[in-house]
Image: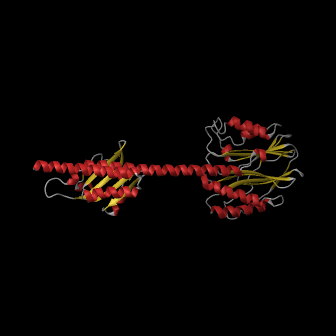
Amino acid sequence: MEEKKVSNDRLKLSRFKLDSLLDITLSINANLPTEDLLSKYESILRNDLGIGKILIFKRSATWECLLNGGFPKNFETLDVKSRLLDFNEITYVSADMGFEGVDIIVPVYNNNEHLAFLFIGDIEEEGEGMSPVIKHLNFIQTISSIIIVAIENIRLHKESLRQEALKKELELAARMQKMLIPDSRSMPKNPEMIVSGFYYPHYEVGGDYYDCVKLSETKTGICIADVSGKGISAAILMSNFQASLRALLTEDIKLDSLIQKLNKIVVSNAEGEKFITFFIARYDHKNKVLEYINAAHNSPVLLDTATNKVYHLKSSCVGIGMLDEIPAVNVTDIPIKNFSKIVCYTDGLSELKGEDGADIGTKEIIRYISNKDPVEKNLQEMIRFLGIPDTNPYLFDDVSIIAADLR
């Protein structure tokens, strides 16, 4: 009779384990959420096995408390890295280990790495013999591993979906941003002024912007800008800046007044967290005068091809959004007496490294435009020489260039 009872007990135990594993497996296959899986798991350990307290630390990006059933709240802030990573086997906790209320620590592995730690406390004791919890420790470790791996897979799947959604958003943002950058084919190409551009965002979206706007039959505006910082926030600020500039720039607005108005808009939108370096020029090809303001941007290069004289159009005020009020704005007029070329660029170009390891600055620009060829041809040759974007190992930023032949 005693042997039959033992045999029946073993059969019940085997059925319990199989039923529990089947229930958990079916729940995982049914794509139940993490909360439901943990609820089933906790029920098996606490209700079926008589465990009074359980706590799980799980590793994902960092170690976190995944489930706390009965332990004090301060256990949830335990420093897992320093306190638990040495536990490689199921361990019975003694008083000198410093885990008050914890009877057993069960490590959970995945690919030979710690994935979780299970704390067990207040285990139900039998009148005689071994606690049933101790009998089931290997089963507890197995079912814990199944649950933790399933929950980690759920997290990774959600993260994958989130990354895919973010990728699509970035692709859409990149397409929208490129629409703000005028294509070279759409920019002025007439006897007085031929404009060309080049745009390469290092990431999906960038903080560079250039534009060319026909203001009247005799006046054309060109500009280039670079927002501090990278990413979507920089791109959104620059998009707003482009809309504001397009709304404000006219053939007769004073450029210093334009700068002050743009500054107020950027200060309001960026709230002091970002600023924009900006160069704006307006060419009157009837009177052959180029007027400009450089708001802390890289100095554009102007070359008079008849005299080979090079001008660096240096800063005349602080950047847009750096201060609530720009204290002084200087407008500069330059007469265009001969066929000239102007090249405006962002620091993604000037900070490329040369063979000597130093920034190239404007050296390559001057070298390539110092001839009578159209500036568009000069740019194509320079970009090819610099290996932008495919072969230059020093390309770590957006590269934007807008250039023009002035006659």
Task: Please name the residue shown 33% across and 48% down the image.
Answer: 145
Write down the quadrant of residue 362 in the picture: top right
Q: Nearer the viewer, residue 309 or 33?
A: 33
Task: Please name the residue shown 67% across and 39% down the image.
Answer: 388
Question: Is the residue 404 above or below the residue 50 in the image?
Answer: above
Q: Position of residue 5 (x, y in %)?
A: 14, 51
Report if residue 218 is visible in the image. yes
Q: Position of residue 193 (x, y in %)?
A: 84, 46
Question: Is the residue 266 above or below the residue 169 in the image?
Answer: below
Q: Nearer the viewer, residue 112 or 3?
A: 3
In this view, which residue lies farthest toward the left? 1
Write down the quadrant of residue 261 in the picture: bottom right
Q: Position of residue 73 (x, y in %)?
A: 34, 63
In this view, which residue lies farthest toward the right? 286
Horizontal side of 201 relative to 148 (left or right) equals right
Horizontal side of 109 relative to 206 (left or right) equals left
Task: Please name the residue shown 77% across and 44% down the image.
Answer: 185
Task: Please name the residue shown 68% across and 40% down the image.
Answer: 360
Horizontal side of 388 relative to 119 (left or right) equals right
Q: Position of residue 382 (x, y in %)?
A: 72, 37
Q: Nearer the viewer, residue 334 or 156?
A: 156
Q: Nearer the viewer, residue 46 or 254?
A: 46
